[in-house]
Amino acid sequence: MEWDSNSEEGSGGEDEEGFLLSDGGPLPFSAGSLLETAPCGFVVSDALEPDFPIIYVNTGFELVTGYRAEEILGRNCRFLQCRGPFAKRRHQLVDSTVVSEIRRCLELGVEFQGDLLNFRKDGSPLMNRLRLTPIYGDDKTITHVIGIQFFTEANLDLGPLPGSVTKESYRSFDRFSSDLMSSRSIPSGSVNAGHEVCEMFQLSDEVLSHKILSRLTPRDIASVASVCKRLDQLTKNEDLWRLVCQNAWGCETTRVLETVPGAKRLGWVRLARELTTLEAAAWRKLTVGGAVEPSRCNFSACAVGNRVVLFGGEGVNMQPMNDTFVLDLNATNPEWQHVKVSSPPPGRWGHTLSCVNDSLLVVFGGCGRQGLLNDVFVLDLDAKHPTWREISGLAPPLPRSWHSSCTLDGTKLVVSGGCADSGVLLSDTFLLDLATIEKPVWREIPVAWTPPSRLGHSLSVYGGRKILMFGGLAKSGPLRFRSSDVFTMDLSEEEPCWRCVTGSGMPGSGNPAGTAPPPRLDHVAVSLPGGRILIFGGSVAGLHSASQSYLLDPTDEKPTWRILNVPGRPPRFAWGHSTCVVGGTRAIVLGGQTGEEWMLSELHELSLASYVV
């Protein structure tokens, strides 16, 4: 049942659905053959106690290994690396590099997958295809580690141990295989019968669902569902899937997804699958009424719930604009509406527009009649009489334009880079907490090393309080070049620092696998549930196409660029778009440069989930 973005629905019956590891590689057997030939062990260890003691094993583990639960509860699972119950040391044929990798993954709190030689209680060898998944508590501390084991016979002739219990072990193995085979003959509608055969857990359904399963990622839940019929039934529960999505993607994302029109009809299981695999992603052209007049470019837009808000821009003869427009996508016939507001900010372009505290719009910086700006204005879009209000933050950044910004925790504005006076490029990062808008204080984030100065780059949030910088026009000595470098920073750390994911000659740089996007600026970056970043468009040098979409998951141990082939009608215009994500499932693309003129009359939507009216 594991999900893969290239899978096709309806390709076969449930019993023959293929298995896939989280890295996309298939296991060499189908679900049907798994039930017949590859017994599964299921182990839960307590990560809060020293040495990860086992607190639960399933019947399959007992029958295959020959060890009873009461013999091993409270012990570390490494005893399987010793040949027989009385051996004191790991067998010399056990791969020490795999053992070291397991230890490293447990220390870092990341998932492990690999093959390891194990031994039954009678000393006979087994190959264990092992998958270890850490489970996090509410305070982001690892509370448990789940081990899923696919056992197969090892082709080794080591001879029997003195006083071995080979016959007993093989009788247990035969009983286990018989139980698994009999489970295939149970009618699909007989839930109680399925529970009788798969009575593998001593934990109640409620404990399994809320304390363990809800802490897994959507992909892992899809995989765990294939272990037995009881887990398959548990993982079909919509409430469980909502908890899974909430724990994996955050409360805010889950809350936003609940407001998506048609989300209830899709259901959390399907929504989680489509947002994980992006199998339903598609471009479509939007036709809306009204108009944004006068015509302009270099404006900024953001989403407030299911509304798109546009502010400012550069009009004819470099005229700075200061008007506000709203497009309500929940309306039966969406159309642009000019919002009458009091005390608008000075006109500007090259600024940023963000949303904090659910409905509070924040404008920062840009270029106006008097030059570069570093002022902050806020507007409560839901107020009875919307009024722009200037916020005098202490210790503001240098005036700038063509910078990038993002929001954290729904209340904090992060600003990075841009262009200062005399064309000087900047590399600083500032944070402004707008939880209370009375005299907020700007805080520069001190770092030992910064990425090269740049403008026209993107700044995206992932994993709660981590930010990712991509692309832009970056300084390289006396020259400036388009960039495809990726940098990340974790703002939850006591001393945040920039880390280079990929780049030429950068400290700590690497080169992710896959096809990286060509260097670019003025592109679109979309943060997806689960921490992935989607890159589209921009000003790209040479003959490269800007209409190709690229996907990167910075949470992977080895981040990999992937080309995302999206059907439908993408924007024809190569660069200068403004984009915002509406309802967590729709990226709205506004405007763009044809090479001859700027366009604002056409809108395009990148739908990340099935479009349900």
Image: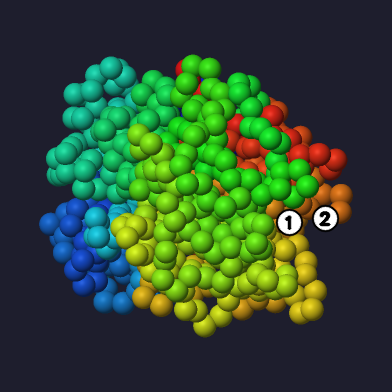
Residue 312 in view in this figure: yes
Nearest to the observer: residue 485 or residue 436: 436
Figure quadrant of residue 572? top right
Which residue is most to the bottom?
448
Depicted 128 relative to depicted 33: above or below? below
Locate residue 239 relative to residue 127 in the image: left or right.
left
Q: Pointer 2: residues within 10 angstroms few (<14), some, or many (20+)?
A: some
Figure quadrant of residue 166? bottom left
Q: Which residue is tagged 1?
A: 520
Locate residue 537 relative to residue 198 in the image: left or right.
right
Could you say which disc has been placed on residue 610 in the image?
none
Nearest to the observer: residue 232 or residue 547: 547
Could you say which disc has been placed on residue 541 in the image?
2
Mark 1 and 2 residues: CB-CB less than 8 Å, in contact? yes
Residue at 65% across, 70% down? 420
Q: Pointer 1: residues within 10 angstroms few (<14), some, or many (20+)?
A: many
Residue at 18% across, 57% down? 55
Image x and y of residue 310, in percent: 56, 40
Residue at 85% across, 40% down? 596
Residue at 38% across, 69% down? 441
Q: Earlier in the sequence, mark 1 or mark 2?
A: 1
Image x and y of residue 454, in percent: 67, 67
Amino acid, disc 2: Ala
Image x and y of residue 177, in percent: 32, 38
Judged from the image, the secondary structure of the residue bearing numbered disc 2 is loop
